[in-house]
Image: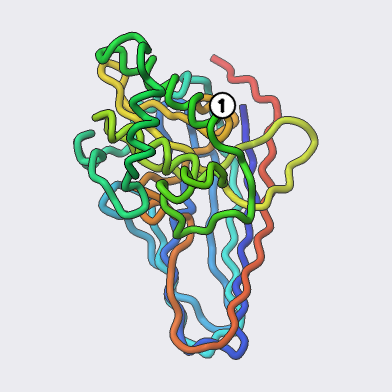
Amino acid sequence: MRIRVDHQTTYRYQPPAKAALQVLRLIPRSHEGQNVVRWRASAEADVEVQLKRGEDALGNITQTAMIQGPVGELVLKVEGEVETWDTHGVVRGAAERFPPEAFLRVTPLTAPSPELCAFALEAVAGAGGEHDVIARLHRLMLAIGGAMAFETDTTHPATTAAQAFAQKRGVCQDFSHVFISAARRLGVPARYVSGHLAREGEVVEQDASHAWAEAHVPELGWVGFDAANGVCPTPSYVRLAIGLDYLGAAPVRGSRTGGGTETMGVRLRVSHAAFQSQA
């Protein structure tokens, strides 16, 4: 399958900001099941933008945009195509900088509440025994989908897994944090993934990028779990970055100096077309 992504995020500052710094994780890597055919990520503003490419500690490709103001508008653009194949959610050949055990670490966004811990244990009870990790994770994913409703405008980027689980609603970020929190409680390394999802049908306009989780399964390695949709990632998914939680994998994260009101607008089109590989 070939997936095309056109993504533009526009920040406006009124009055203009004195300076701005943005760290971008908008460039995917190729690995088994995902081949980046072409990709371009850029930053434009009403003043000069210095864009420096690098890598973070987890191996994500980063771009650091440095803008000396006054800056009234900053536009981040992404345009590219990726070929994907079905791996049943298993991720191999990706950049791995740390052993799986590093992803057992609890963060403020993924710290479990007593209620979430009890839910995790109950969700996997009788699911193939303690050593059948993949069965337990599938059971956990489906249980989260059954316990929570997908609703926008009920959470924000700083909402924790415990808070989202308590109100039993949220967006893909919240479902992912709940899954990660519960999996770590069960002793399974888990991490956050940011990316894109090409949805079925004619609708290609989207309000935001997508997110899901990956958990480490003995003998299989890292496997993706999208609790918001109740599936392991298919060829319709484009994987961008990983992190211990949203903060480590956020497509755009930054700060500014000065300025008054900040507004943000997003235009995202993710589409897929039939692609037939040739030997």
Q: Secondary structure at mark 1?
A: loop
Q: Quick check: 181 above or below 249? A: above
Q: How is colour applied across the structure in the image?
A: rainbow
Extreme residue in the top direction = 128
- The residue sitting at 40% across, 47% down in the picture is 162
Residue 103 visible in the picture: yes
For disc 1, the marked residue is 235
Residue 51 visible in the picture: no
Q: Position of residue 90 (x, y in %)?
A: 40, 23
Q: How many marks?
A: 1
Tell me the quadrant of the picture where the N terminus can be found: top right
- The residue sitting at 40% across, 32% down in the picture is 31
- The residue sitting at 51% across, 24% down in the picture is 142
- The residue sitting at 52% across, 47% down in the picture is 167
Q: Quick check: 105 above or below 85? A: below
Q: Would you identify the image quadrant in which residue 223 lies?
A: top left
Tell me if 159 is positioned left or right of 116 in this view.
right
Foreground: 172 or 181?
Answer: 181
Tell me if 273 is positioned left or right of 253 in this view.
right
